[in-house]
Amino acid sequence: MSESVINSIKKAISNYKRGKIFFPSSFSEFGSSTAVRQALNRLEDKGRLVRLAKGIYLYPKNHELLGILQPTLEQIALAISKRDKARIIPTGINALNKLGLSTQVPMNVVYLTDGTPRTIKIKNRTIKFKIASPKLLSAKNETNVLIIQALRELGKENIDATIIEKIKNILKKVEIKDVKNDMKLAPVWIAEIVESILKK
């Protein structure tokens, strides 16, 4: 393996802030796939990079008390979606958390995507990408999609006054025409709940 490949990758990495996530494809200009992977393995051995999962590397940021600061699952998922030029939609507890409807931070997350379906293990955590319907991905506003996913996770019988009030406040930041348009993509019961909130 050429030392020039290692040196080129080291130089490229140093141009970024610590905490940056990289993939072998990030360095394809510096050599063959095999040469790049071997170089990344060497840099991992030297502590220059941390391997988060197969083909996913972290330029580590160290905290004097906490040690290496691990990226969130969302940061990793966003990095993957950017690499793949794919769109992703948070689901389940993750959607609730992003909307402030739950303080629970999920250990495992599921995203709907128009990219490749796969499951990635990050130590004891997992990121799962599932194929999304083209209809859902056609939504005009990300917040509306999060609301659909969050309410789906809660279930119709668990939508109480507190949730309604929080959704109402969230919707104040979204164009009403976009809400009405995007709710055409939602299950009927969710669309009806959101419509009733808009009338309040």
Image (cartoon, grey):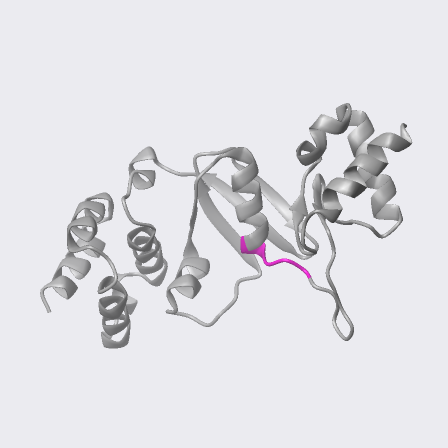
Indicate whether 51 appears above or below 147: above
Q: Is residue 191 magenta?
A: no
Q: Is residue 130 left or right of residue 21?
A: left
Magenta-tinted stretch: 70-74
> In the rendered image, which quarter contains the N terminus?
top right
Q: How many marks?
A: 0
> In the rendered image, which quarter contains the C terminus?
bottom left
Q: Quadrant of residue 134?
A: top left
Which residue is drawn at the image coordinates 49% and 70% (left, top)?
104
Q: Is residue 71 left or right of residue 112?
A: right
Indicate whether 181 appears above or below 7: below
Can you give x and y, in whole percent of width and height, for residue 160 in the image? 25, 73
Can you give x and y, in whole percent of width and height, for residue 139 in the image? 28, 43
Indicate whether 195 appears above or below 49: below
Can you give x and y, in whole percent of width and height, for residue 198 in the image? 14, 62
Query: Magenta stretch: dominant SS?
Result: loop
Q: Quadrant of residue 163?
A: bottom left
Q: Is residue 72 magenta?
A: yes
Which residue is drawn at the image coordinates 78% and 31% (left, top)?
36
Which residue is drawn at the image coordinates 71% and 27% (left, top)?
29
Can you give x and y, in whole percent of width and height, for residue 93 in the image? 44, 61
Q: Is residue 65 left or right of residue 42?
A: left
118, 22: nearer the viewer:
22
